[in-house]
């Protein structure tokens, strides 16, 4: 008994010591904190992150819209000009117009020669809220400048009557872009030819006839076939064929000044394209105001509902105040309009 008592007492002391050690052990503190402390902190931090997400999304969307604005997008457009275009004295007018527009232009060899190509530089970093196809839009636009005589040769090729097979000129398989054609001074070129060689006849035919008379050689059937009159009827026919067969549009301008105006208008249209495409990709592209009826107070008794409904109608694209008044008068609530739209036509 005397031995057992001290042993029990010692065991009791060891037990108390172990118990105190276990209570002081970090495992117990971690277990308690897992169920109470850190979990609550993590939940609060996650709640803060979730609360910040809408604000960050709105900020990212606003930044993307700022980059897509036409006045910002035109600064990221690059016009690549072929050096052969600079051989003409009027090319300085074109370069000055592009510089005043705010876009960059680079003098680089292009294929085909005497062409201009538009490309778009993506912003860094690129906003993730904007689809990638928006930034890639309009990267294959190309304008090919043609001399009047070169264009008339293509007109002869399109309107020839010697054979049933006619190939379409100015189509380049190695280039993925579908070019736009521009001819400077074609009207003056044709009028000058009329005073020299006759009405509705081009210098292209005159030079061939002059060379034939000097050489005094008999005309071959092929040469006789190509020696036809080229005038405005043939030019208009060729322009229609180019549009129908190859989807090529032809721009006829009188001077470099007029060409520069068209170039600036085309560049501005390219700058507006990404912004319009981004708006169409949104959930409600027809809503031009960008927000709903913020600022309209609606009380519990229904006061203000008519004004909120009227503002919602006005936010649709091309809806005048008179049309909004008529819709709200006929259908005082959105549910009534929805019920009216769901009815079959025979029940109206």
Image: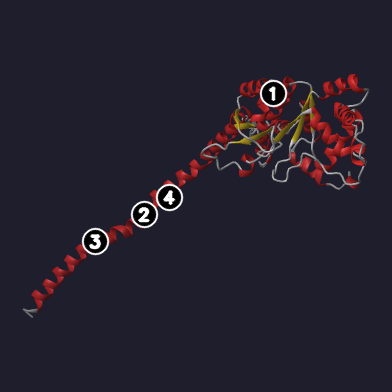
CB under 8 Å between callouts 1 and 2? no
Q: Residue at x 32, y 60 (%)?
A: 31
Q: Residues within 10 Å of mark 4 (few under 14, many from 20)?
A: few
- Please report contact status of discs 4 and 2: CB closer than 8 Å, yes or no: no
Residue 324 lies left or right of residue 205; in this view the side is left
Question: Does dot 2 land on a helix, a strand or a loop?
Answer: loop
Q: Secondary structure at mark 4?
A: helix
Q: Nearer the viewer, mark 4 or mark 2?
A: 4
Mark with earlier residue (4, 2): 2
The first of marks 3 and 2 along the sequence is 3
Circle 2 packing at 10 Å, graded few (<14), some (14-19), many (20+), is few
Give the Cα distance between marks 3 and 2: 17 Å
Lower position in the chain sequence, tag 1 or tag 2: 2
Q: Please give the label number shown on residue 23.
A: 3
Q: x and y percent of residue 156 in the render?
A: 87, 36
Q: Is residue 301 visible in this depiction of the protein?
A: no
Say above or below: 293 vs 256.
below
- Where is residue 304, by image quadrant? top right
Residue under numbered circle 4: 43
The label shown at residue 88 is 1
């Amino acid at each position: 008994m005397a031995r057992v008592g001290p042993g029990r007492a010692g065991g009791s002391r060891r037990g108390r010591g172990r118990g105190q050690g276990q209570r002081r052990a970090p495992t117990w503190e971690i277990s308690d904190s897992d169920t109470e402390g850190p979990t609550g902190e993590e939940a609060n931090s996650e709640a803060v992150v979730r609360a910040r997400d809408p604000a960050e999304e709105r900020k990212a969307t606003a930044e993307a819209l700022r980059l897509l604005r036409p006045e910002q997008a035109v600064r990221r457009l690059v016009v690549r000009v072929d050096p052969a275009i600079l051989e003409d004295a009027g090319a300085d007018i074109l370069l000055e117009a592009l510089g005043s527009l705010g876009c960059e232009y680079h003098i680089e060899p292009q294929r085909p020669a005497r062409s201009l190509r538009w490309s778009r530089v993506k912003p860094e970093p690129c906003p993730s809220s904007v689809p990638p196809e928006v930034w890639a839009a309009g990267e294959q636009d190309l304008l090919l400048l043609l001399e009047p005589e070169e264009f008339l040769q293509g007109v002869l090729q399109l309107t020839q009557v010697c054979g049933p097979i006619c190939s379409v000129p100015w189509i380049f398989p190695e280039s993925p872009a579908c070019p736009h054609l521009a001819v400077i001074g074609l009207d003056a070129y044709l009028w000058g030819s009329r005073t020299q060689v006759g009405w509705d006849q081009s210098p292209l035919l005159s030079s061939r006839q002059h060379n034939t008379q000097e050489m005094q050689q008999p005309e071959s059937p092929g040469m006789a076939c190509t020696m036809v009159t080229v005038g405005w009827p043939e030019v208009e026919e060729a322009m229609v064929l180019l549009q129908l067969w190859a989807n090529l549009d032809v721009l006829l301008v009188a001077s470099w000044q007029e060409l520069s105006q068209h170039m600036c208008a085309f560049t501005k249209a390219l700058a507006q394209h990404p912004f319009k495409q981004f708006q169409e990709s949104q959930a409600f592209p027809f809503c031009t105001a960008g927000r709903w009826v913020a600022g309209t107070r609606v009380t519990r008794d229904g006061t203000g509902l008519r004004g909120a409904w009227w503002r919602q109608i006005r936010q649709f694209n091309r809806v005048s105040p008179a049309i909004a008044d008529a819709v709200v008068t006929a259908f005082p609530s959105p549910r009534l309009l929805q019920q009216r739209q769901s009815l079959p036509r025979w029940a109206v």
